[in-house]
């Protein structure tokens, strides 16, 4: 059986226990047409056949990781109530669970005093961070890496913020020398450091950026939407580990539990080291904030209605997998990194392939060998199609040729962009399946 369904029995037993808590209410009569519901759901099932098998280890393309059964079950269980974590009267207990779960995420970075909450995803979380940055440093420019997620440019334009793109070095990291020269010109309020770029998984050089902050007094926002959880692992390389050691010192950071945190979409998290930035969120509502004198999550969030189910699922998952070094959750992340290192080693040792850089986290970017960047791009696109026919699903990624000119030899750089292959080995099962994955790669090549 491809799908895990045994847990549905747990859901039924949990639903019965949930119902006990409302025994003082009169029974409800249902007029639902269950035969029609079933007919529609069977049609939904048929339509969903058209998706890639994101849940399977042979899917190694985009950043898609299946939610853990405990997250699925807790999410579904809460939907019978459908809490809204905007105000306590919309999600009293789920709001408390959100605060506890977010505090556990903050504790990964050593933060005990902080401000934070869940969001609908990394885009909203990063938008709140840049909005706060603009209030703290009004009118100042925001520096963003060219390899940062495109959402930062889009958000800056939506919020009408001044931003500039910073070029990258050969490892797809923010060019610190460029940043230094730009800071010397003045009027830089925030530097966005990416901890795990969505393209290559690269980690920007936080130690060097921290040194510059001492002189130029700017804010540092860490977009750790993809890579944040790797702070728990023990198998990072030296420079990457040094960057993670600096994370507790940034001003704000974003982590996406719906990436490596085993959660269903959408679940992002924004954290601020200084709780006093909450003053920028302050607002009043004529009808939502009367249940309690305690802080409502809606009073520290730009979003209004937010799914309490996301908080319940995250809380339950972190009870099963505590966010601690050497715990099962951390060991599974280490397996994903081991899978990336193993794939990189096999590609690097095979003359049929070209690699771009060693993986810092669990993403490997590679290509078929060729005489020119145009031919390599064509080979990559063909390989992508053939791999899917063998049930191995990869991703394509356009990479600037300018970052390869000093590292790739005997190649005609006849295009500005190179289409290469990107493998996100997010699932711990990828390590056990590496022989099977390599067998398919070898056969096609």
Image: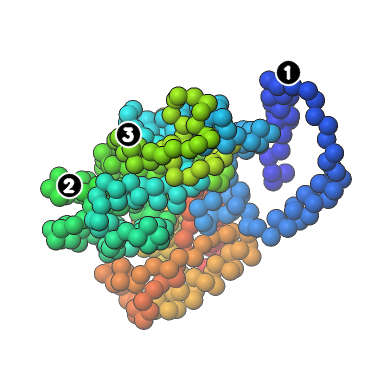
Residue at 43%, 68% (x, y): give it: 398
Above or below, 41 relative to 442:
above
Residue at mark 2 = 217
User: Residue 186, image x and y in percent?
Assistant: 15, 58
Would you name the residue on which mark 3 appears?
A: 275
Q: Of label 1 and label 3, which has the lower sequence position? A: 1
Identify which residue, 113 or 202, lies in the foreground.
113
Q: Is residue 344 left or right of residue 163?
A: right
Q: Are marks 3 and 2 in contact (CB under 8 Å)?
A: no
Q: Which mark is residue 24?
A: 1
> Is disc 1 surrounded by few (<14), some (14 to 19) or many (20+) residues within 10 Å?
few
Quarter of image, res 243 = top left
The numbered mark, 1 or 2, whose residue comes first in the sequence reads 1
Q: Residue 360: x and y, percent?
A: 36, 50
Distance of label 1 from label 3 (alpha carbons): 41 Å
Q: Which residue sits at x=44%, y=45%?
A: 302
**Real-space CA distance between mark 3 and mark 2, rounded to the nearest whole angstrom:** 19 Å
Which secondary structure, mark 2? Answer: loop
Element class at badge 1: loop
Q: Residue at x 60, y 34 (%)?
A: 83
Q: Position of residue 256 (x, y in %)?
A: 46, 44
Cα–Cα span, label 1 and label 2: 59 Å
42 vs 139, nearest the viewer: 139
């Amino acid at each position: 059986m491809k799908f895990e369904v045994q847990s549905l029995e747990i859901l039924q037993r949990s639903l019965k226990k949930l119902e006990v808590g409302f025994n003082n209410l009169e029974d409800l009569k249902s007029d639902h047409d269950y035969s029609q519901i079933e007919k529609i759901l069977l049609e939904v099932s048929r339509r969903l056949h058209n998706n890639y098998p994101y849940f399977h280890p042979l899917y190694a393309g985009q950043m898609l990781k299946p939610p853990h059964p405990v997250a699925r079950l807790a999410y579904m269980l809460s939907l019978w109530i459908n809490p809204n974590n905007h105000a306590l009267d919309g999600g009293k207990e789920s709001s408390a669970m959100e605060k506890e779960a977010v505090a556990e995420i903050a504790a990964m970075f050593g933060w005990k005093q902080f401000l934070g909450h869940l969001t609908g995803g990394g885009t909203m979380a990063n938008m709140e961070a840049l909005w706060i940055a603009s209030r703290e440093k009004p009118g100042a420019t925001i520096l963003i890496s060219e390899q940062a997620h495109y959402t930062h440019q889009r958000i800056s334009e939506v919020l009408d913020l001044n931003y500039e793109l910073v070029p990258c070095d050969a490892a797809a990291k923010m060019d610190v020398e460029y940043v230094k020269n730009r800071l010397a010109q003045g009027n830089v309020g925030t530097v966005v450091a990416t901890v795990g770029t969505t393209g290559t998984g690269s980690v920007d050089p936080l130690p060097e950026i921290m040194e510059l902050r001492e002189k130029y007094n700017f804010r540092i926002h860490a977009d750790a939407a993809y890579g944040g959880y790797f702070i728990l692992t023990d198998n990072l390389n030296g420079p990457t580990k040094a960057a993670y050691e600096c994370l507790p010192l940034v001003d704000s950071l974003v982590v996406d539990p719906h990436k490596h945190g085993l959660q269903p979409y959408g679940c992002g998290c924004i954290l601020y080291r200084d709780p006093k930035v909450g003053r920028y969120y302050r607002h009043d509502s004529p009808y939502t904030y009367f249940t309690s004198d305690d802080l409502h999550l809606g009073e520290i969030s730009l979003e209004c209605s937010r799914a309490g189910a996301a908080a319940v699922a995250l809380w339950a998952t972190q009870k099963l997998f505590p966010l601690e070094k050497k715990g099962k959750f951390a060991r599974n992340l280490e397996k994903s990194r081991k899978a990336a290192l193993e794939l990189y080693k096999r590609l690097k040792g095979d003359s049929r392939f070209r690699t771009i850089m060693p993986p810092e986290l669990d993403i490997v970017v590679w290509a078929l060998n060729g005489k020119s960047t145009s031919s390599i791009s064509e080979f990559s696109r063909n390989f992508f199609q053939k791999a899917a026919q063998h049930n191995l699903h990869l991703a394509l990624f356009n990479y600037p040729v300018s970052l390869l000119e000093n590292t790739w030899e005997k190649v005609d750089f006849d295009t500005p962009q190179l289409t290469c292959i990107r493998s996100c080995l997010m699932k711990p099962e990828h390590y056990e399946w590496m022989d099977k994955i390599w067998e398919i790669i070898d056969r096609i090549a």
